[in-house]
Amino acid sequence: MGQIEEIIKELKVKIIETLGLIDVVPEDIKDDDRLVGGDLGIDSIDVLELVMMIEKDYGVKIESKEVGVKVFASVRALATHIFQNQKKKD
């Protein structure tokens, strides 16, 4: 399994925990499904919580709404953004 796949797996669990999604399991979240405005019902307040979690857990900032729109397109897009921008741990 590649690093992005590992981040995707981890993110699904963190999204469910961060947003307190009841009756949602990681398998319910498809890698390429829309995150915001999709089946999960994630709204702009949820996005703010996710932005803070990503900054805290991964050290990756989402600087602008434009970046956010691209990044929160899907779990895969989010994982790719984190992978590409994460500070390399020595």
Image (cartoon, grey):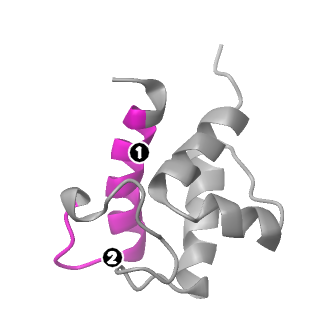
- 6 inside magenta stretch: yes
Up-down relation of residue 56 to residue 87 (above or below): below
Q: Which residue is mark 2?
A: 20
- The answer to which quarter of the image holds residue 63 is bottom right
Residue drawn where x is 30% and y is 63% of the image: 29
Q: Which residue is mark 1?
A: 8
Residue drawn where x is 70% and y is 46% of the image: 60
- 70 inside magenta stretch: no
Pointers 2 and 1 in contact (C-beta within 8 Å) = no
Magenta-highlighted residues: 5-25
Up-down relation of residue 46 to residue 35 (above or below): below
Closer to the eye: label 2 or 1: 1
Q: Is residue 33 left or right of residue 72?
A: left
Up-down relation of residue 53 to residue 89 (above or below): below
Q: x%, y% of residue 18?
A: 42, 68
Q: Earlier in the sequence, mark 2 or mark 1?
A: 1
The 10 Å Cα crowd at callout 1, few under 14, some 14 to 19, many 20 or more, is many
The residue type indicated by label 1 comes to Ile
